[in-house]
Image (cartoon, rainbow, N blue to C red):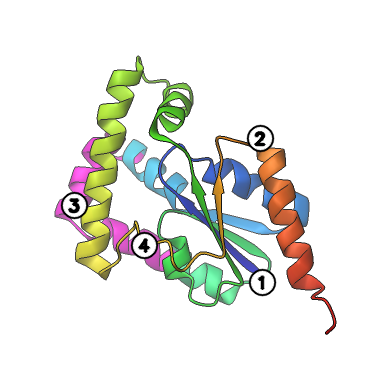
């Protein structure tokens, strides 16, 4: 089974992906973690690295191509990233996590150890705008088009375990469809 988990920064995609990978014994590949690692290697903040990626499409394309290649040839994998649902053409289940901006900002402040919510909001909204432009330019993908996803969940309402239970139910139904 191939599952993609996508959503905007701070929506909980990495947490849910880790939960699902551990619970089901799946491998996990995270585009966001690869992107953050590249930013760190280049000694740049995420926003600055995003602008660099905007100028040089090879960064995004390398990450996206690698995730697509690994995910499409693997079984029992979770592909986590904003474009995963679009990139993994043979995904069995595509999930989009949503959370209101205030919720996401609080998570980002904690996760990325940003000094305050105002700074986190500026960085996050700038990053989202930058990424949306790159996705449209590189792949003609409108990141706000959620029509490809089978599950769209508001991660503000549940813990990771609660979200995981919903997805666990979906996986169980896909593995054992009702006989008609």
Q: Which residues are magenta?
A: 41-66
Front-lying residue, 19 or 172: 172
Residue 74, relative to residue 42: is it above or below? below
Q: 173 left or right of 119?
A: right
Q: If you read the primary sequence from the N terminus, does the residue marked by circle 4 or circle 2 appear first? A: 4
Reading the image, the residue beneath label 2 is 159
Say which element carries label 2.
Answer: loop
Where does residue 83 sit, x and y in percent of width and height? Answer: 40, 60
Q: If you read the primary sequence from the N terminus, does the residue marked by circle 2 or circle 3 appear first? A: 3
- Residue at x 41%, y 28% (from the top left corner): 102
What is the quadrant of the C terminus in the image?
bottom right
User: Crowding at label 2, few (<14), some or many (≥20) Cα neighbours within 10 Å?
Assistant: few
Q: Which mark is residue 75?
A: 1
Q: Are marks 4 and 1 in contact (CB under 8 Å)?
A: no
Where does residue 106 sit, x and y in percent of width and height? Answer: 45, 24
Say which element carries label 3.
Answer: helix
């Amino acid at each position: 089974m191939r599952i993609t988990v996508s959503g905007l920064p701070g929506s909980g995609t990495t947490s849910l992906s880790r939960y699902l990978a551990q619970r089901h014994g799946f491998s996990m590949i995270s585009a966001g973690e690869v992107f953050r690692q590249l930013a760190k290697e280049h000694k740049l903040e995420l926003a600055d690295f995003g602008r660099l990626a905007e100028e040089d499409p090879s960064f995004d394309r390398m990450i996206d191509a690698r995730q697509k290649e690994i995910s499409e040839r693997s079984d029992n994998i979770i592909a986590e990233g904003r474009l995963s649902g679009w990139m993994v053409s043979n995904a069995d289940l595509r999930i989009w996590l949503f959370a209101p901006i205030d919720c996401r900002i609080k998570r980002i402040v904690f996760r990325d150890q940003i000094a305050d919510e105002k700074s986190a909001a500026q960085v996050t909204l700038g990053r989202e705008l930058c990424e949306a432009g790159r996705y449209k330019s590189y792949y003609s993908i409108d990141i706000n088009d959620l029509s490809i996803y089978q599950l769209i969940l508001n991660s503000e309402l549940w813990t990771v375990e609660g979200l995981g239970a919903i997805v666990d139910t979906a996986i169980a139904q896909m593995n054992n469809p009702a006989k008609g």
